[in-house]
Image (cartoon, rainbow, N blue to C red):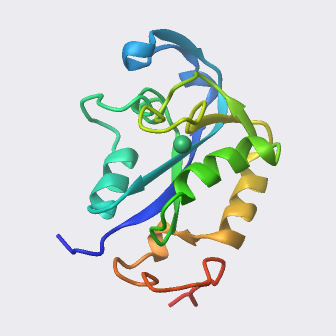
Amino acid sequence: MLLNDSGVYVLLIEVPPTAAGSVQVGRLGEHFLPAGPYLYVGSARRGLSKRIARHEARRKQTHWHVDAVTLRAGRIRSWVWPHRPGLECRLARAVVGRGLGQVWVGGCGSSDCSCASHLFRATVSAGRLQRLLCAQATPYRDWRPGEGQSSHEPTKRRPRG
Ligand SMILES: [Zn+2]
C-alpha cells in the first residue's frame, strides 16, 4: 500500500426507482430509501483506492451506514481532494449550506464528528452535482495516489491524459 494513498472523497450515488425501498442502516434502524441521487462525504488517511473500490463494489458485507445506499445504487461516481484536516466535515456542511442536499438519516458516517450526517439525499440533479464536483475536485478515475499531496490549490484540475 502506498503511504500517501490518502484523500477526502465525495461519492455521487444514484439509486434507480427499481431499487427504492426499505433498507437496514446498521444500528440506525430500517429506513425508506427513495430513488434519486445521494452524496456521501468521507476520508481515508491511507488506503484511499481500496476504500473507494469497496464503496463502488456491488457485493460486500455491510459495514458502514453508507453501504445501505451503495448496495442499492445504479451508478456510483467518486471525486477526490488531497487529504487536509477538517476538509471532510467542511464539505459535509457545504452540502446543506449550499442547498445541494438534506440529511437522509441522521448520524450516517458521522459517528466520529459533530456533523448531523455525512450522507445526504441530493436536492438538485445528479448532472448539476457532477458539474460542481468536476469543477472542484479530481474525478477518482483520474486520481493517482500521491499526486497533489503538497498542493495548496485544491481547485486546480489535473490535465487529462
Ligand atoms: Zn463531520
Quadrant location of the N terminus in the rendered image: bottom left
Q: Residue at 52%, 26% (x, y): give it.
A: 107
Q: Residue at 50%, 36% (x, y): give it.
A: 73
Asked whether 133 or 96 is in front, the reply is: 96
Q: Residue 96, how many percent across, how many down? A: 75, 40
Q: How many marks?
A: 0
Task: Give the answer, above or below, for where 78 lies relative to 16.
Answer: below
**Quadrant holding ligand 1?**
top right
Q: Residue 11, how many percent across, how many down? A: 53, 50
Asked whether 53 or 1 is in front, the reply is: 1
For residue 42, side relative to residue 89 (left or right): left
> Is residue 100 visible in the rendered structure shown here?
no
Q: Residue at 55%, 87% (x, y): give it.
A: 160
Q: Residue at 47%, 67% (x, y): give it.
A: 140
Q: Residue 40, how many percent across, how many down? A: 55, 43
Query: Which residue in the rendered view is the most extreme toward the left?
Result: 1
For residue 109, side relative to residue 132 (left or right): left
For residue 61, side relative to residue 14 (left or right): left
> Is residue 21 visible in the rendered structure shown here?
yes
Q: Residue 124, how many percent across, how many down? A: 80, 43
Task: Give the answer, above or below, for where 55 lies relative to 9.
Answer: above
Task: Give the answer, above or below, for where 50 lies relative to 17.
Answer: below
